[in-house]
């Protein structure tokens, strides 16, 4: 039995004529302790997929099974790191994290919450900024707070919805390492949604491309057999890395071309000719 | 080798010189900009006073000319000459009834302040005089004698402030919770929408009459003066719409990301409202409250005037009806006092808003 299982998931938005099927026939299973990445174009329904797994959305048909039980609604067992941080701007870093701590340990007193929050903030090395408001932090620091908040819920599984796509390349690199370090410590199951193939290969055990929507489905999976801890600079010369990277990019390019070809299908034009008035002059 | 060392020291001294120059420049008091900053508002005030003075002078001249002309045609040359002389001498019996000049308004302000101290002394004297009588009256089970002389200008300002704050509190207590409920539930929004749209544009005078009808009947067996109750309820009803609409809008337009966070963190309904929705709607609510405060202060004058509730509105109306020599300038004094208090109330609301809200708003 897989840890997380998606069975024939189908999600449509709208009713009647404006009905669009965003995801169709998604099947996925993730084992405990695994780090899976889903790579896809923007607008292919990645966020919808994450929201189905964390319980913010319900599938139109099919079911999400987590630890043998059907997912209904959100739960602190599945922590989410949102794409745009989603920190509450009127709360300090500590209080933002504390909201999640309270959810995971509802029956403790304030000093325990405070200590736990401090622990998670320290984990993402933000202790100096503990009393700052989100607007006083840089983008990378905000995302680290979001990571701390997701971890503070003591989740069994972490869902990451393009957590690093709004950051610059250097910050991205350090945050990738930080997330990997934390993941490595207690080997939680993790699902990373990203649009960056390199990021996926560097971080995940398995990469699954999401074919672009509407009617997005998952493509064939690519296993990444590179030993951890992975070295970013050495990775560039790694044969497995190069091959996997080329294969995934080739696959995504092919899908892209396919779509272009579809779009280029000749449109039948009506047989009309502009009327000429020249002869009347 | 030696050369390079020399070069280095030279460089360093150059850098130091540049640094020291910078250091001396920065703390220097910049006289010209700060003077400019002061000069612009001061000169605009002077220009305003100048235009006011010239306008008041020309209006006064126009009235004098008209009245002298009238005296000439009605009563002849002698009467006209006497009237001209009378105006020129600024005799109390020959005063124009038009826009007062800045100097007249200033002297009226002084009169009003003096008047305040006189009445204050009067009240103290009265209290001392009646103290013994009141004690025996209370011992006999009778009502004590209270001061029933006229109210001073300051008393009227305080009464007006009380009315506006009572009205504001009423608006706050009614509009904020109602706005939250309307914002949270689309069904309630539909139910209340026509109500808001229809009653929002109703004039303060009509609100006053409506409240008058209801409160008068409700307090029909009371012998007390109910003008205060009527005026503060009217002020509250006139001014609460901005808060109601803004609160409902703020609550219903909370960022979807925050709602998602609340769902992922599994906050209960109560927690969700108080920890996520309300803080996020707070800037909207305060914008509404600020508008409510200024609208309340604006309609207060008209409502006090109608309700005969003692206060600035009644003061203005009584002065207008009074028609004494300095009535017009007292009205202008009241106008400035109303304006300044309105401005202070606005700043007061802004400072509360900035103290409790996560978004800082600048004054306009």
Image (cartoon, helix red, strand yellow):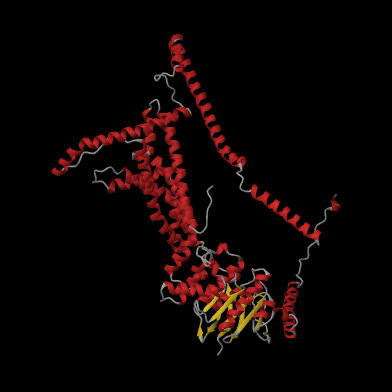
Instruction: State the image coordinates of residue A122 (x, y, percent, origin top left).
Output: 54, 73
- Quadrant for residue B224, please give it: top left
The percent coordinates of residue B247 (x first, y second) are: 46, 57
Q: Is residue A123 visible?
A: yes
| Residue drawn 41% across the image and 30% down it | B108
Q: Is residue A94 above or below residue B93?
A: below
Q: Residue furthest front?
A: B2
Residue name at image x 58 percent, y 37 percent: B39
* In the rendered image, the vertical position of residue B130 relative to residue B72, given as above or below: below
Of A240 and A136, which appears nearest the observer? A136
A178 vs B271, nearest the viewer = A178
Quadrant showing the N terminus of chain A: bottom right
On the picture, is A150 further left or further right than B300? right
Left or right of B222 on screen, residue A279: right
Q: Nearer the viewer, residue A63 or B82?
A: B82
Of residues A81 and B37, the one drawn nearer to the viewer in this rendering? B37
């Amino acid at each position: 039995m897989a840890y997380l299982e998606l069975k024939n998931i189908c999600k449509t938005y709208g009713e009647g004529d404006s009905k669009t099927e965003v995801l169709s026939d998604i099947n996925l299973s993730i084992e405990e302790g695994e780090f899976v990445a889903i790579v896809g174009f923007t607008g292919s329904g990645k966020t919808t997929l994450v929201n189905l797994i964390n319980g913010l959305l319900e599938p139109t048909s099919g079911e999400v099974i987590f630890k043998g039980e059907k997912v209904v609604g959100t739960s602190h067992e599945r922590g989410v790191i949102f794409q745009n941080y989603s920190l509450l701007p009127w709360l300090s870093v500590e209080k933002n994290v504390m909201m999640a701590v309270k959810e995971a340990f509802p029956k403790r007193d304030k000093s325990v919450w405070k200590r736990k929050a401090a622990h998670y903030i320290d984990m993402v090395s933000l202790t100096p900024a503990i009393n700052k408001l989100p607007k006083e932090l840089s983008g990378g620091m905000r995302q680290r707070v979001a990571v701390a908040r997701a971890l503070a819920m003591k989740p069994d599984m972490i869902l990451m919805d393009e957590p690093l796509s709004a950051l610059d390349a250097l910050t991205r690199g350090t945050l990738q390492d930080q997330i990997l370090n934390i993941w490595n410590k207690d080997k939680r199951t993790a699902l990373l949604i990203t649009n960056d193939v390199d990021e996926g290969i560097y971080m995940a055990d398995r990469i699954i491309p999401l074919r672009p929507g509407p009617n997005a489905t998952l493509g064939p999976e690519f296993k990444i057999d590179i030993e951890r801890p992975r070295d970013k600079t050495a990775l560039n010369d790694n044969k497995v890395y190069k091959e996997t990277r080329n294969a995934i990019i080739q696959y995504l390019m092919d899908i892209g071309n396919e779509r272009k070809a579809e779009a280029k299908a000749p449109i039948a034009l009506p047989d009309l000719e502009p009327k000429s008035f020249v002869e009347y002059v | 080798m030696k050369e390079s060392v020399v070069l280095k020291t030279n460089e360093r001294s150059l850098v130091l010189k540049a640094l020291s120059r910078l250091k001396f420049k920065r703390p220097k008091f910049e006289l010209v900009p700060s003077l400019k900053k002061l000069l612009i508002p001061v000169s605009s005030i002077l220009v305003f006073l100048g235009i006011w003075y010239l306008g008041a002078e020309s209006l006064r001249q126009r009235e004098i000319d008209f009245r002298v002309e009238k005296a000439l045609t009605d009563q002849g040359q002698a009467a006209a000459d006497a009237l001209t002389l009378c105006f020129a001498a600024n005799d109390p019996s020959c005063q124009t009834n038009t826009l007062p000049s800045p100097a007249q308004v200033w002297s009226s302000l002084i009169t009003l302040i003096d008047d305040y101290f006189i009445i204050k002394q009067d009240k103290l004297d009265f209290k001392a005089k009646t103290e013994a009588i009141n004690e025996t009256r209370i011992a006999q089970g009778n009502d004590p004698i209270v001061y029933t002389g006229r109210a001073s200008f300051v008393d009227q300002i305080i009464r007006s402030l009380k009315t506006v704050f009572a009205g504001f509190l009423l608006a706050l207590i009614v509009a904020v919770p109602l706005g939250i409920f309307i914002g949270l539930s689309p069904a309630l929004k539909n139910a209340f929408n026509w109500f808001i749209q229809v009653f929002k544009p109703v004039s303060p005078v009509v609100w006053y009459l409506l409240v008058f009808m209801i409160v008068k009947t409700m307090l029909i067996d009371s012998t007390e003066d109910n003008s205060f109750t009527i005026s503060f309820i009217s002020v509250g009803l006139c001014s609460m719409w901005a808060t109601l609409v803004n609160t409902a809008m703020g609550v219903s337009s909370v960022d979807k990301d925050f709602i998602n966070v609340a769902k992922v963190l599994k906050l209960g309904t109560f927690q969700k409202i108080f920890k996520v929705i309300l803080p996020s709607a707070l800037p909207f609510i305060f914008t509404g409250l600020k508008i409510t405060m200024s609208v309340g202060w604006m309609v207060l004058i008209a409502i006090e005037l109608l309700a005969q509730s003692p206060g600035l509105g009644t003061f203005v109306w009584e002065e207008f009806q009074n028609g004494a020599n300095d009535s017009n300038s007292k009205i202008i004094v009241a106008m400035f006092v109303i304006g300044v208090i309105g401005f202070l109330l606005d700043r007061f609301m802004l400072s509360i808003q900035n103290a409790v809200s996560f978004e800082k708003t600048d004054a306009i």
